[in-house]
Image (tube, rainbow, N blue to C red):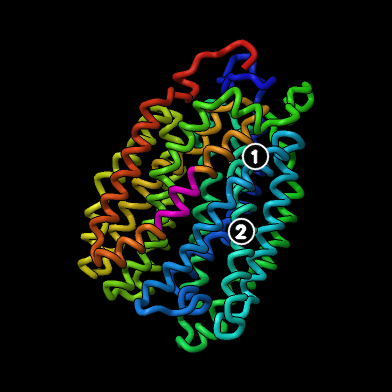
Amino acid sequence: MASTHPLPVASAAAPPVDRKALRRVVAASVAGNALEWYDFFLYSTAAALVFGELFFPKGTSPLLGTLAAFAGFAVGFAARPIGGVLFGHLGDRYGRKGALVWTLSIMGGATFLIGLLPTYAQAGLWSPLLLLVLRVLQGVASGGEWGGGVLMISESAPPEQRGFYASWSQIGVGGGFVLSAAVFFIVQMLPHAEFMAWGWRVPFLLSIGIFGIGVYIRSTLPESNDFAKAEAAGRTTRMPVLEVIRTHPKAILIAMGLRVAENGGSYIFLAFSLVYGRFIGISSSIMLAGVMVSMTVELAMMLFWGRLSDKIGRKPVYMIGAVGLILVAFPFFMLLDTKAPALIWLAFLLGNPVCHGAMIGTQPSLMGELFSTEVRYSGMALGHEIASVFAGGLSPLVATALLAKYHAPWPVALMLIAMGMITVIALLCARETSPHAARERPGA
């Protein structure tokens, strides 16, 4: 039976941490995460810029093709809980490392094949159908990726610095997005006809090389410390998904609530914003530059927020991000409406490094500390991925539909406020999990 205790806090008897080995785990995990999420984020950028025109029949409105492309985006998110259950089971039962090699293999293969797909003009309905199948495979892989990538670091870090070290796992997520946006930014410099004919395929085809590098990196990693100890002590469980539902139901619901503002808000800022920018006549280059600059700044801010969560607690830092999202919802679109590059980039800086950064930088340690080692991969995957279906998966689709209906951003701003409020409620229901606020529990 799985223990109901969270991650243990530091004690005087705790063995010293091998800092050199920890740095190696951090570096390898960040690189592996970045390569995996590069593949996953390619679809969101392509859905906003090209997939609507290439893979879906055009309607009377140019937004209809984009709506169809974002529907495919949502399908990928719908598949993520399947991956969470599958790889959560494998990760809790047999180890984090092996599960992560499989997630990267599936992701790399699916992404490469997207780059080879025929367009709607070439293959008719087979084109969007095959695209959706490959998007489902991407979703399954990403559903198992996040929890394992986080745990490879957090389960090897000293408890009093877990917030800081765990935030490094998110550097890989942010780095993957920056890398995918940068590659699209470069290929968009081609003449438009060449970009639409073959240039958009290049970022997807590059994933075959990324796959090889990523698998090599992950295959050389040691197993996480906490899992290795649990396995040696015979404390793994046969059915971790069922066990975590039985023993940690509240923690799963809290994790889902924490995810709503972070994930839903991020895809409004990163994917829907590109659609809105094109809708009001801002060039894609200016919007992509704003995304890349803000995400690059956020990489450093994630570490700052993670470190701060070790000092003042997980909940206060996460609350900064959730409340910030509520406050910035209307100003974000007001700044975009100016069409001034500096103010557009300011909008992205407020939305990403400040609001999203405070949540995403704290999320790995906060979620991980809600669950015990035996079921931690499964618990994090369930809470993280089920919420992603409704938050990240549907947010750009719903936002684009609202824009198509109202031709104004205020309904999307209200949606951001609602997501922020859901996460605030989840935080109020959660207990503080950082070591300075937790007490040691026997058997933790």
Q: Quadrant of residue 239?
A: top right
The residue singled out by tag 1 in the image is 152
Mark 2 closeness class: few <14, some 14–19, many ≥20 residues within 10 Å: many
Does residue 26 appear anywhere in the picture?
A: no
In the rendered image, the vertical position of residue 104 relative to residue 209, given as above or below: above
Task: Please state the horizontal and vertical placement of residue 174, each as a whole percent of the image.
Answer: 49, 54
Residue 302 on image: x %, y %: 44, 45
Please identify the quadrant where the C terminus is shown.
top right
* Camera-side residue of 442 and 60: 60
Residue at screen point 28% across, 58% down: 346
Q: Residue furthest top?
A: 442
Is 103 located above or below residue 193 in the figure? above
Could you tell me the amino acid type at mark 1?
Met
For the point 64% across and 47% down, the residue is 83
Position of residue 182 measured from the top left corner of the image (x, y, whole percent): 49, 68
Q: Looking at this view, is 137 or 377 the one in front?
A: 137
First in sequence, mark 1 or 2: give its number: 2
Q: Residue at x 53, y 76 (%)?
A: 55
The x, y position of residue 427, in whole percent, is 38, 30
Residue 374 vertical placement versus 265 (above, below): above
Is-magenta flag for residue 392?
Answer: yes
Please name the residue shown 70% across and 34% down the image: 92
Distance from disc 1 to disc 2, alpha carbons, whole Å, reads 25 Å
**Residue 136 image label:** 2
Q: Is residue 386 magenta?
A: no
Report the amino acid beneath label 2. Val
Residue 235 visible in the snapshot:
yes
**Magenta residues, start to end:** 387-396
Tell which of 242 and 48 is nearer to you.
242
